[in-house]
Image (cartoon, grey):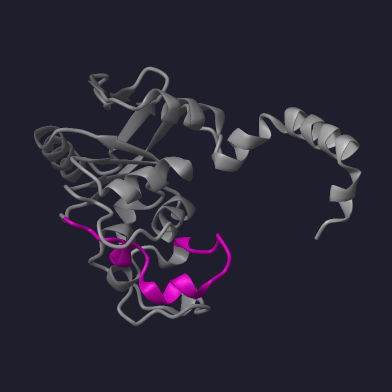
Amino acid sequence: MDKFTLHTGIVAPMDRENVDTDAIIPKQFLKSIKRTGFGPNLFDEWRYLDKGEPGMDPASRQPNPDFVLNQPRYAGASILLARRNFGCGSSREHAPWAIAQYGFRALIAPSYADIFFNNCFKNGLLPIVQPEEVVSQLFAEVAATPGYRLTIDLERQRIVKPDGSEIAFDVQPFRKYCLLGGLDDIGLTLRHQDDIRAFEARRLAAKPWLAHTL
């Protein structure tokens, strides 16, 4: 996965509490056996006026002009500002896939559902937790300022606002290490590929019949 070090992006406000994973990526899109292609269907039932089905051309759909991601001022947004309990509901990993594949790199909210929170880190997203009063202030600033941008410095664990003021955030050290290095679970394992190959060579030398075991 891509490394996360320093990111600056437009902020899109999702001003709803308890946004569940079926709203993030509706159930009909879970039929795919691939891990790609979910971005066009992020928030599908809110984003479009017609009912979405797998394989539909997004260009042929009817966008909902009132939905936040369809508003020109939030075009290209890569930081999602949300309310409490974001990502609740089922544990589908497709939810962070869709968010990341749309183009978001980070989220800011007062709280997240536990499984969704963990899945974000495993897929290169940085979910930042901030107190509700801080989140509410950010919502107000985003509403007042078209093109509102934040810079997220993971190394320093700081959110930098347009006026230069900073907001600190916490992140578990191992998760921070993985994001900075761009390491998912497979990447973590592949750091030891030389040791794995050496072990397999020793094992087959001692027990050569294992090479022919199904």
The picture places residue 12, in percent across and down from the top left corner, at 29, 48
- Segment colored magenta: 18-39
Classify the position of the C terminus by image quarter: bottom right
**Residue 43: which quarter of the image?**
bottom left
Pick the residue in front: 15 or 112.
112
Is residue 19 shown in magenta?
Answer: yes
**Residue shown at the point (27%, 27%) measured from the top left:** 162
Relative to 59, is 152 above or below?
above
**Residue 198: which quarter of the image?**
top right
Pick the residue in front: 55 or 138.
55
**Residue shown at the point (33%, 56%) measured from the top left:** 72
Horizontal side of residue 62 vs 196, given as left or right: left
- Total number of numbered discs in the rendering: 0
The picture places residue 180, in percent across and down from the top left corner, at 50, 27
Horizontal side of residue 197 vs 183, given as left or right: right
Pick the residue in front: 177 or 147.
177
The picture places residue 63, in percent across and down from the top left corner, at 34, 72
Pick the residue in front: 78 or 34.
34
Residue 12 at least partly seen: no
Relative to 97, is 9 above or below?
above
Is residue 137 shown in magenta?
Answer: no
Residue 27 at least partly seen: yes
Classify the position of the N terminus by image quarter: top right
